[in-house]
């Protein structure tokens, strides 16, 4: 990154134009008038990111020819990425734009999720699976199965309602869970991508601002969250976006993401009982 120096033959113009681009990023233009060829040479020597004025770096440039072999050089600028003195080892980089969204996604849950630990109150998975593997169709049709020792067992009443669904061919139940997405725009490649992906992590959503959808903070409080995305991509305009997403599941009554599988000290693969 260098400082832009206009030709000595050029005169700065008082008309500065401020605005924003199609994505909402702040812009400002600076102009100089002088010999056309001098301005064109200066424009060709300009690199994207060069400092044009305090707080503004070059994004694009153009030269407009005027009568008498003169012209006007206009440089479109954006705010710099406040990287500090060492841009290669910066600790933090402030985004130019920070956008939040929330949507629902479909998740198919096994019908066996209705099973529970109480044989009298809950459908019993072990007994249902034994019944499903029963080779004798006449026994299975009566909701019975035979143990290896020859004993015939009736499915408990608590399992029959679920078995009726299975007999209809139902294998899964549709559920919809929230996904919160945060997209930040940067002037340069953002740091810390792929951070905490696949781990339990609560999105740090802002609350009570115009940048946060209504009720976002309340929705976050109701769920347990797994970070499922943290991508960085350069855009056609030279900016970078970092996109992070979190998927939520109900967190009440001991539910939520399994810490053995998604926690900070999750099981290794293969798992070894120590």
Image (cartoon, rainbow, N blue to C red):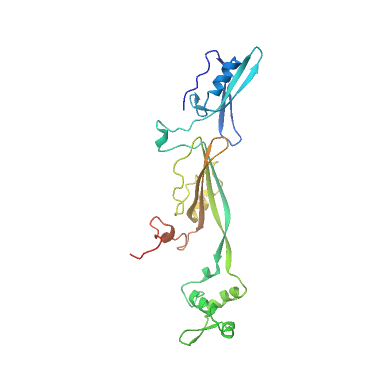
Question: How many numbered tags mark residues here?
Answer: 0
| Image quarter of the C terminus | bottom left
Query: Which residue is the extreme one toward the right?
Result: 67
Q: Position of residue 118 (x, y in %)?
A: 47, 75
The picture quadrant where one finds residue 36 is top right
The residue sitting at the bottom extreme is 150
In this view, the residue in front, 158 or 53, is 53
Percent across and percent down for residue 138 are 59, 85
Q: Is residue 21 visible?
A: yes
- Residue 13 visible: no
Q: Position of residue 175 (x, y in %)?
A: 57, 61
Above or below: residue 40 compared with residue 95: above
Most distant residue in the left direction: 274
Q: Is residue 69 left or right of residue 54?
A: right
Q: Position of residue 184 (x, y in %)?
A: 52, 41
Figure check: 231 above or below 146: above
């Amino acid at each position: 990154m260098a400082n832009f120096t206009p030709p000595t033959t050029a005169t700065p113009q008082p008309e500065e134009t401020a605005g924003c681009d199609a994505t909402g990023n702040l812009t400002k233009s600076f102009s100089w008038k002088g010999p056309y060829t001098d301005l064109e040479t200066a424009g060709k020597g300009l690199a994207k990111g060069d400092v044009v004025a305090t707080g503004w770096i070059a994004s694009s440039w153009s030269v407009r020819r005027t009568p008498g072999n003169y012209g006007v050089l206009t440089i479109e600028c954006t705010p710099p990425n406040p990287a500090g003195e060492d841009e290669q080892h910066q600790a933090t980089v402030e985004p130019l734009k920070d956008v939040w969204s929330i949507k629902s996604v479909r998740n198919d849950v096994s019908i066996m999720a209705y099973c529970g630990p109480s044989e009298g109150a809950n459908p019993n998975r072990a007994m249902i699976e034994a019944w499903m593997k029963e080779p004798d169709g006449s026994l299975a049709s009566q909701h019975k199965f035979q143990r290896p020792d020859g004993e015939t067992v009736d499915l408990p009443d608590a399992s029959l309602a679920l078995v009726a669904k299975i007999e209809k061919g139902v294998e899964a139940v549709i559920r919809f869970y929230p996904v919160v997405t945060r997209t930040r725009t940067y002037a340069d490649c953002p740091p810390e991508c792929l951070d905490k992906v696949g781990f339990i992590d609560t999105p740090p959503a802002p609350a009570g601002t115009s940048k946060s959808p209504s009720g976002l903070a309340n929705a976050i409080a109701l769920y347990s969250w797994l970070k499922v995305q943290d991508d960085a991509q350069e855009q056609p305009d030279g900016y970078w976006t970092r996109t992070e997403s979190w998927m939520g599941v109900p967190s009440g009554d001991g539910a939520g993401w399994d810490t053995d599988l998604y926690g900070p000290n999750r099981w290794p693969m293969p798992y070894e009982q120590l």
